[in-house]
Image (cartoon, rainbow, N blue to C red):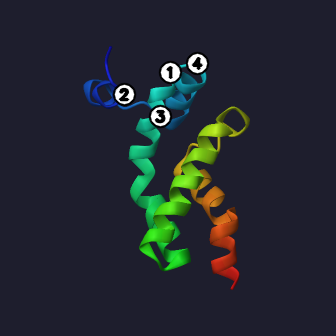
Amino acid sequence: MVSPTELAASQEPMSDEEVVARVLASETGMFEIVMHRHNQRLYRVARAILRNDGEAEDVMQDACVRAYEHLDQFAGVIATAPGMATSLRRMPQATARWTG
């Protein structure tokens, strides 16, 4: 079986929407591709809000888990970098620090 990383490297890049469709079709390991694509951007957003590396990593992990858990509800939005960044900003840990 080919890993998601190997698959991504061996073919023309799939869009986030195509990857999400495959995740929803039971190829759950494909979610790794979306995460690798947007990891840096999400970390920068979390770090800008929280101003703490450890907290930023924790919030980012929570946002990724939540995105995965709710992928079927928000497939067209949540799996994109802007959608995940919005989700991250709305998380309680980030919101508490952002507002105050």
- Residue at point 45%, 29% (across, down): 30
Disc nearest the viewer among 3 and 4:
4
Q: CA distance from mark 3 to mark 4?
A: 15 Å
Q: CA distance from mark 3 to mark 1?
A: 15 Å
Instruction: Judge left or right: residue 4 versus residue 29.
Output: left
Amino acid carrying label 4: it is Ala
Amino acid carrying label 3: it is Ser
Residue 78 shows in this picture = no
Which residue is under mark 4?
Answer: 25
Which residue is under mark 1?
Answer: 27
Residues marked 2 and 3 touching at CB (< 8 Å) = no
**Percent from the top left, x then y, of residue 18?**
52, 28
Quarter of the figure with residue 24: top right
Marks 3 and 4, the one that precedes in the sequence: 3
Q: CA distance from mark 2 to mark 3?
A: 14 Å
Amino acid carrying label 1: it is Glu
- Residue at point 39%, 58% (across, down): 40
**Percent from the top left, x then y, of residue 15?**
47, 34
Amino acid carrying label 2: it is Pro
Disc nearest the viewer among 2 and 3:
2
Q: CA distance from mark 4 to mark 2?
A: 14 Å
Which residue is under mark 2?
Answer: 4
Q: Secondary structure at mark 2?
A: helix
Residues marked 2 and 1 touching at CB (< 8 Å) = yes
Instruction: Locate the N terminus and report the quarter of the image it occupies.
Output: top left
Marks 3 and 1, the one that precedes in the sequence: 3
Which residue is under mark 3?
Answer: 15
Residues marked 4 and 1 touching at CB (< 8 Å) = yes
Q: Label 2 crowding class (10 Å Cα cut-off): few <14, some 14-19, many 20+?
A: some
